[in-house]
Amino acid sequence: MRTFLLFLLVLMVIGYYLLILAMIGILVTAAIALPLSTHNPRAIIYGEAACIAILSSLVLGFWVSRFVEPRRIQIRRRHAPPLFAVLDEVGQKLKFPIPDEVCLTHDLNASVHRAGAFLGVIGGRRILTIGLPLLDALTIERFKAVLAHEFAHLIHKDSALQEIVVYAEVRMGQQLQSLAEHRYAIVNPCYWILRIYYMIIDFVSSYLSRVREFAADAFAARAYGSNVCAATLMDVERYGFIFSMQLSNLARTGQTANPGNPLVGFREVIAQFDEPTLKEIEATALQQRAGLFASHPALSHRLGALRAYPTKAEPEPILARSLIEKADEYEASLSNLLMEEVYERRQ
């Protein structure tokens, strides 16, 4: 299924470029033919202006700047031996080499990608990015389940051709935004054709992303147990909700629970939430449904799919933050990067 969807998506991306070339060809032909088909000066002026405006929107949309790399700090084995010992353990369990680089970021998340890889799969550096707040929210065993999930994306080659698809979607988004700014966009056939095509690509891409998430969940569940993976998803959901609230407040007001160190403020806020409140957050999350264009499945669907896999005993809970000996120093640096990012956005 994943291979078929990826093949379909690549064909649609190729079709997008052919569609744009066809539109440009038709518009150029129309601009040349218009003065030959009428002697009405006003019709010629308005027609030429419309062709030029639409052409500029389509052509300028191809100029996509390189994606801005997220702010992160590379962490090396000598700086966090316990963290890399866990990575080695997970890699040996899954029979897969650990990523080439490990970085910390200020988000409550974890991700993997290949930097500089041809077609997203050949060569390049495999980079694992770990959000330090994630280590504040998970035990070591549940953090291992997260690592297994992320390793699964590398093992399944989920980055294959992804950059090509993402760039096509970004270009289409820029072109649509530019076309929508024109006064008569609602009657512009190029706008509607491109918008419908964009929605189809986005739908297929989102569906493929959800399929990949289910596959990565299953991979992690077989390695560390469905109960551990389910508990991990719940932890990430409820603490992610609290963290996103704190980030939204920081972005809106520039204020945080700890002005000097917003990530410390996040930990302080977590400590204020009692169990009944956390249960309410969980109940709300379980009621949410994933839309047609969601990149991740609904939490309830992910938990339901995990029930098909065996459970495993979970060892004594130890906070994953303990894997980084100088976590406070990294936290201070990441807080500074977070405040820089917030300041730039507020500017």
Image: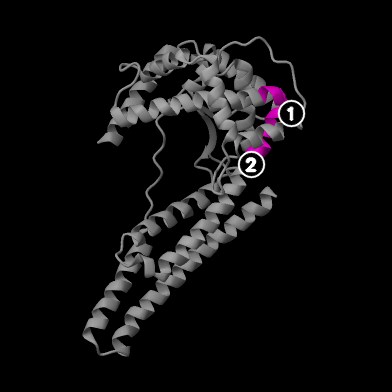
Left or right side of 242 for 225: right
Under mark 2, the amino acid is Arg
Q: Does the magenta stretch include residue 213?
A: yes
Under mark 1, the amino acid is Arg
Q: Which of marks 2 and 1 precedes in the sequence?
A: 2
User: Is residue 105 something one can see in this rendering?
Assistant: no
On residue 222, the disc is 1
Specify the segment rendered in magenta. 211-229
Q: Quadrant of residue 216?
A: top right
Please tell me whether the stretch drawn in magenta is mainly helix, strand or loop: helix
Left or right side of 267 for 258: left
User: Tag 2's secondary structure?
Assistant: helix
> Which residue is nearer to you in this view: 128 or 203?
203
Place of residue 144 in the rendered image (x, y in percent of width and height, measured from the top left): 63, 22
On residue 212, the disc is 2
Place of residue 161 in the rendered image (x, y in percent of width and height, measured from the top left): 56, 49
Place of residue 153 in the rendered image (x, y in percent of width and height, measured from the top left): 62, 37
> Which residue is nearer to you in this view: 96 or 314?
314
Q: Tell me what residue is drawn at x 45 percent, y 69 percent.
A: 21
Left or right side of 68 for 293: right
